[in-house]
Amino acid sequence: MIRAQGNLIRLLDLDDDFIIDLKYATADNFTGQKIYLSGECWIDRHTAGILCRAKDIFKKGRYRVKIWDAYRPISAQKRFWEVLPDDRFVARPPDMAAIKSFRPTHMNGMCVDVTLTDLAGNEIEMPSPFDMLTGEASLDYPGHTETARKNGTYLRRVMESVGFVHYDDEWWHFYDMTGEPQPFTDYSI
């Protein structure tokens, strides 16, 4: 049975082959605080579908997908902004009274932060650690090793092949640009 809340579903109900390590459900993140109430990964239904397609491609290459972030309640976004009010790394919390249209974001479950592991679940070398809030988080940063750049480029290529768009300042961040943007929500899940 797939649990749902609005447009969101619990990813592991759809496919249990993902590794879930929601960083904001722990203190192992840029805030140093536990932000989420739960470590369960919720995601937009359409976004989950294309993420599963990417996961299947990665699996053929002998990799698994680890999820660091997906759906994020509006209240969590507000806490992030309080810690780091910098539009390059933290989206400004929305003024819900002024919003006339929606776009893909974590606040509607249409963005994912992901990395790759080997089949045993060990992370492979990537351009930088997650949540590195500097220029080193960009895939284009010139100081990355050849292996890190190759792995990051492979991640980007596969994710884009199924409909995601990459965010240039964070090699791990992808927007679902093929789904219909859903309203932002503040579910405590």
Image (cartoon, rainbow, N blue to C red):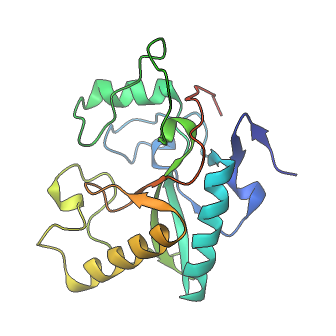
- Residue 18 visible somewhere in the drawing: no
Farthest-out residue, bottom:
61
- Residue 34 visible somewhere in the drawing: yes
Q: Which residue is depicted at the point 33% across and 55% down?
A: 167
Quarter the C terminus occupies: top right
56 w.r.t. 100: above or below: below
Looking at the picture, how far across and down is residue 174, in whole percent? 43, 56
Looking at the picture, how far across and down is residue 80, in whole percent? 35, 31
Looking at the picture, how far across and down is residue 91, in whole percent? 34, 34
Q: Is residue 85 left or right of residue 63?
A: left
Farthest-out residue, right:
1
Q: Which residue is depicted at the point 60% across and 72% down?
A: 55
Q: Which residue is depicted at the point 48% across and 68% down?
A: 159
Q: Is residue 44 left or right of residue 92?
A: right
Q: Is residue 136 left or right of residue 42?
A: left
Q: Is residue 146 left or right of residue 155?
A: left
88 w.r.t. 15: above or below: above
Q: Nearer the viewer, residue 37 or 112?
A: 112
Looking at the picture, how far across and down is residue 49, in whole percent? 67, 60
Q: Nearer the viewer, residue 50 or 3?
A: 50
Q: Which residue is depicted at the point 49% across and 21% down?
A: 100
148 w.r.t. 140: above or below: below
100 w.r.t. 9: above or below: above
